[in-house]
Image (spheres, grey):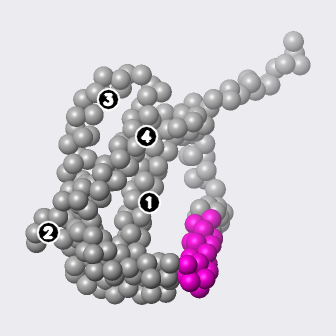
């Protein structure tokens, strides 16, 4: 029928990867000031929930400390963050971070090398290619927890690590220092997990699977 001439074809809900790339190229034609506003909005939308969560945690932490609940073993945020700042200005903490990170990277690297052989066998299955990064993310989480447990149980002389510092602080009842080390361990774990999440999202967008569940 003549009335149907010129109508665009129906759009598939599962947008192929090449369509997403074309959309990205078209977005580059947007004026720079508009792109800057979009970037600022995107950054703000990602940062404000994190900032709000930190404020809520610190406020709750301070209230618990003021209540006097297990005050001897549960220091307040002021003493803990001050202790953390002091440790960051010394070489011992950075040496411990480097030792723990080296152990984690070597162990995880060997695991990835073995897992990559298995992953190559399923690489021809398209939906499993993001799944591979998700597997790396889960593997790192298990490796990080196992490494922390190992460093708490096995102490090697003259090799400071995060686990050794945490164990020493606990033995000396230095709870502000122990809590500061726990915060460092938590931050490192979150940062690496975030990096894997970004890599997973990039691969899903590359293969046109961004709308599918992880």
Find numbered disc 2 in the image and state the secondary structure of the residue it sits on. loop
Residue at left offset 34%, top offset 82%: 174
Q: Which residue matches tag 1?
A: 190
Q: Which residue matches tag 2?
A: 159
Find numbered disc 1 in the image and state the secondary structure of the residue it sits on. helix
Q: Residues within 10 Å of mark 1 (few under 14, many from 20)?
A: few
Residue at left offset 26%, top offset 47%: 108
Q: Which residues are magenta?
A: 49-69
Position of residue 177 measured from the top left corner of the image (x, y, whole percent):
35, 80
Front position among marks 1 and 3? 1
Judging depth in this view, the residue of 188 and 39 nearest the camera is 188
Find numbered disc 4 in the image and state the secondary structure of the residue it sits on. helix
Q: Which residue matches tag 4?
A: 134
Judging depth in this view, the residue of 144 and 18 nearest the camera is 144
Q: How many marks do you count on the picture?
A: 4
Q: Is residue 53 magenta?
A: yes
């Amino acid at each position: 029928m003549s009335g149907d001439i010129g109508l665009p074809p129906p759009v598939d809900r599962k947008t192929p990867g090449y369509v997403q790339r074309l959309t990205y190229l078209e977005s580059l034609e947007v004026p720079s000031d508009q792109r800057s506003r979009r970037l600022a909005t995107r950054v703000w939308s990602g940062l404000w929930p994190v900032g709000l969560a930190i404020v809520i945690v610190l406020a709750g932490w301070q209230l618990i400390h003021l209540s006097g609940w297990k005050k001897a073993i549960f220091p307040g945020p002021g003493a803990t963050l001050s202790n953390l700042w002091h440790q960051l200005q010394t070489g011992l903490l950075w040496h411990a971070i480097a030792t723990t990170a080296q152990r984690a990277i070597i162990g995880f690297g060997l695991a990835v090398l073995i897992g990559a052989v298995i992953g190559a066998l399923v690489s021809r299955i398209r939906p499993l290619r993001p799944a591979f990064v998700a597997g790396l993310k889960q593997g790192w989480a298990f490796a990080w927890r196992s490494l922390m447990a190992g460093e708490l149980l096995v102490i090697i002389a003259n090799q400071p690590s995060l686990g050794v510092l945490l164990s020493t602080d606990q033995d000396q009842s230095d709870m502000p220092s122990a809590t500061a080390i726990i915060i460092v361990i938590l931050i490192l774990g979150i940062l690496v997990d975030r990096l894997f999440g970004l890599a997973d999202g990039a691969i899903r967008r590359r293969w046109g699977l961004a709308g599918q569940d992880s």
